Image (cartoon, coloured by chain):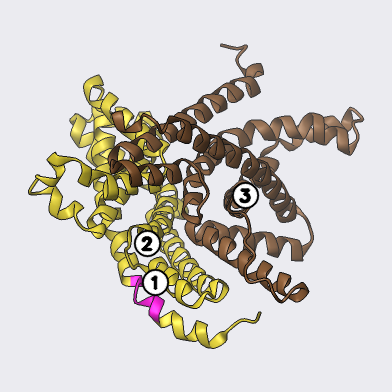
Amino acid sequence: MSLDVDLVVDSIPKMLVGIGLTFELLFLSLALGTALGIILLILRISGRWYLSWPTMVYIYIFRGTPILVQIFIIYYGFPQLDFIRNNDILWPILREPFGCAIVALSLNTGAYLSEIFRGGVLGVDRGLKEAGAALGLSVSQRFIYITSPIAIRLCLPAYSNDVVSLMKSTALASTITLLDMMGIARTIVAETYAPYEIFVSVMVIYLIITWAIQRTFGWIEKRMSRHVRSEV
Amino acid sequence: MDAITGWWDDFFWGSLVVVELFFVALIMTVLFGLIGAGAKLSKNRVAKAIASGYTIVFRGTPEILVLLLFYFGSAITLTAIAQIFDPEIKFVDFPPFWAGSFAIALIIGSYATETFRGAFLGVDPGQIEAARALGLSNLQTFIYVRIPAMWRLALPPFGNHMLSLIKDTALVAIIGLEETLFVAEQAIGYTAKPFTMYILVGVIYLGFSTIITLTVMVLEKYANRHLQVAQ
C-alpha cells in the first residue's frame, strides 16, 4: 500500500470541475435560505399566534430531522404525490436533482438562519428601540433603521458558521446523483479504489473553501464594527 | 399508511440501531472532546498543534466525506494488513457500525473540544482559589468545584452537539448500516411508496430530537437548581 501521487495530480483537476456546482448549490441556497430566514423571522416576531406558531412548527421540523432525510423526501418522495407531478411550476424544478438539492438546502438553512436572526434581533438593546419610538419612528421604521443594522452585526459570527455548515451540506447532493466535488470524488474512488488519495485531496479543497468563508466573514465583521473599535 | 403495515418491526429494529449508534458515538464524542480540550489547554506545543489541526479539519470538511474516508480507508488498510499474514485474503471489511460511530464521534468530538475548552476557561477563577484556600487538593478541586461549574456552562452547547449527532447517524445508511433510512430504502423497493417511508423516517428522527431536547432541558434545570431559589 503506497500513496499514488500521480493519481492525486491527475484527479484534482477533475474534481475541481465540480467546484462550480458546489458553489452554485452554496450561493443559490444561501440566497434563498437567507430570504426565507428573514420571512420566517418576521412571521415569528409578528406577535400574532396564527403567524408565529406555524413558523415555530416549521423550524422545529426542519431542525429536528436530518438534512439527508429531507433531501430524500424531496427527491425520491415527492414524485409519489400526484399533485406535485401535475403542478406546472413545481414539477419542472423537482424533476431535476439540482432543483431538489436547492429546495432542500434552502428550506433547511432557512430554518436555522431564522433562529440566528432572531437571536440577533433579541440581542438589540431595548433602550435603542424605545429611543426610536420616542423620536416618532413607526414600528417598521424602527425595525429597518434601528434593529436591523445592530442585529446584523450581532448575528454575523453565527451566520458565518451556518454558511460553513451549508457548504458542508452541499456534499450531500452527491447522494442524489449530482456531480459536485464530492460526487466526482466518489465516482473516481469507485473506479480506482484509492479512497485515501482522492478523499484526502477533496478534503483539502473543502478546507480551503471553509477557510475562505471564515476569512471573508472575519473581514466583514471587522469592517462592520469599525466604529466600535475606534472608541477603544 | 397501509404501505407501512408489515414494516413496523423493521423500522423498530432500525430505530434501535440508531439508538445504539447514538450512545456508542456519544461516549466516544465525550472522550475525544475531553482529550482534545485537554490537549488544547496543555502547555505542550505539539499536543496543542495536533488538537488545533484536529478541530480545523473535522469542523471544516463535509461529514459524508469523513465517513466515506473512514469506511473505505479502513477497509483498504485492513485488507493490506491481512494480506501480510495471509496473501489469499481478498477483502477485509470494517463493520459499518464501528466505522460510522467512530467517524461521527470524531466530527462531533471536534465541536465538543471547543465546548469543553470554553467551559473550562469559563469557570470563575475565584471559585478555584476559594477551593484552594479551603485546603482542597487538586483532584478534589477538579471533581467538586470545577466539574459542576463546567457542566453548567457546557450543557446548552453540548445539547446541540447531541442533536447534530443523532441527525448524523442517518448518514451511516450510505455505507450500508441497517438503520431507519436503510430500512426505508428496502421498504420502498417492495412498496414503491418513497414519500410515505421517508416521512416515517423523518418522524422517527423528530421523535429522537424531541427526546434529546427535553432531556437537556431537564438536565439544565437540574444543573441550575441552586439559582432558582431567588425566583
Which three-letter amino acid code belongs to the residue tagged 2?
Ser
Q: Which chain is yellow?
A: A
| Residue B95 is a magenta residue | no
Marks 3 and 2: same chain?
A: no
| Residue A17 is a magenta residue | yes
Q: What chain does badge 2 belong to?
A: A
Q: Can residue A33 be spotted in the picture?
A: no
Question: Which residue lies at the image location 84% right of the left edge and 30% below the top edge?
Answer: B131
Q: SS class of the residue under badge 3?
A: helix
Marks 2 and 1: same chain?
A: yes
Q: Residues within 10 Å of mark 2 (few under 14, many from 20)?
A: many
> For the magenta stretch, what is the residue range?
A14-19
Residue A131, x across and y down, in percent: 30, 30
Marks 3 and 1: same chain?
A: no
Quadrant for the N terminus of chain A, please.
bottom right
The residue identified by callout 2 is A174
Q: Residues within 10 Å of mark 1 (few under 14, many from 20)?
A: many
Which three-letter amino acid code belongs to the residue tagged 3?
Gly
Question: Which residue lies at the image location 51% right of the left edge and 84% below the top edge?
Answer: A7
Residue furthest bottom as drawn: A6
Residue A211, x across and y down, in percent: 48, 65
Separation of residues labelled 2 and 1 (CA atoms): 8 Å
Question: Which residue lies at the image location 24% right of the left edge and 31% below the top edge?
Answer: A43
Q: Nearer the viewer, residue B210 or B12?
A: B12
A135 left or right, relative to B117? left
User: Image height check: is B217 above or below A4?
Assistant: above
The residue identified by callout 3 is B109
